[in-house]
Amino acid sequence: MNSIEPVIITRKNVTLLGGGTVCPSLLQETMKKAPCLVAADGAAGQALEMGIMPERVIGDFDSLTEAHRARIPADRLCHVPEQDSTDFEKCLTRIDAPMIFGVGFTGARIDHELAVYATLTRFAHRRCVILGVEDVSFMAPPELTLPTTVGQRVSLFPMAAVQGRSDGLRWPIDGLPFAPDGRIGTSNEAVGPSVHLQFDQPGMMVILPREACDADLVSRLIAAPVWA
């Protein structure tokens, strides 16, 4: 587990804003369930231009302009100058909250987006959901029951070698070996009102339609066990 001290500790869910493509309506919708906004580096500028003052700005500040920095109180700025981690990782490892919702981390540079998923794989014990225009994605906990509708897409993409069990999927995964360079599980479907998943180790990313990220899913993710 990561030993980095958090710079923000809150009982509220956190919206983590990235510097990628940001849909204002998606950000507003996300902040209704996660009202504490943390900006990754230069994303603070997007927040300010939308009239939102971040609770914290975390990063190496290579993309935070002097003009935007001057508008943010000094005690809300967390400068992490090292270059061994991305701004997303700097933020993820310094936030202590029930749930983190990442907005602005999809739809732009694919290398940045892939780096986000790689970070989530390494920090699978962190409760973090990445929201895009079409999808919501997160690393699966050891066990989880998803609220679903019949026919709903439930994609499983392995970021590491992993096996699991399922109940409620059209194509069960029991005993199948998954790996990024082998079998993947995209475009599976729910056959009922819920899907139960279990995995033997961290590494499986769950990808759902964005509208599936409702209060029921969030509460189940918060209540789910975490990887040791």
Image (tube, rainbow, N blue to C red):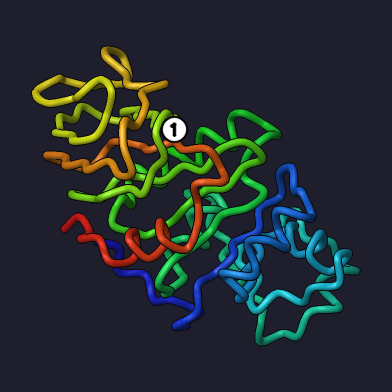
In the picture as drawn, the residue positioned furthest to the left comes out as 175
Task: Please name whichever residue, 94 or 36, is drawn nearer the observer in this view of the structure.
Answer: 36
> Residue at left 37%, top 70%?
4
- Estimate the x, y position of residue 181 in percent, counting from the top left: 31, 14
| Relative to 65, residue 13 above or below | below
In front here: 153 or 161? 153
Residue 66: x percent and y percent?
86, 67
Query: Residue 102 lies in what quarter of the image?
Result: bottom right
Figure check: 217 above or below 72: above
Circle 1: element type: loop
What's the residue at 44%, 66% (across, down)? Answer: 99
Q: Total label count?
A: 1
**Is 136 situated left or right of 31 in this image?**
left
Q: Residues within 10 Å of mark 1 (few under 14, many from 20)?
A: some
Rendered residue at 27%/29% (across/down): 169
Is residue 145 left or right of 149 when viewed as pictured? left
Question: What is the quadrant of the C terminus in the image?
Answer: bottom left
Q: Tell me what residue is drawn at x 34 percent, y 32 percent.
A: 190
Dot 1 amino acid type: Gln
Quarter of the picture containing the N terminus is: bottom left
Using the rendered view, name the quadrant where residue 187 is placed.
top left
Q: Is residue 125 above or below residue 104?
A: below
Where is residue 188? Give x, y as percent.
Answer: 36, 23
Task: Give residue 97's position: percent from left, percent from top.
Answer: 43, 74
**Residue of label 1:** 152
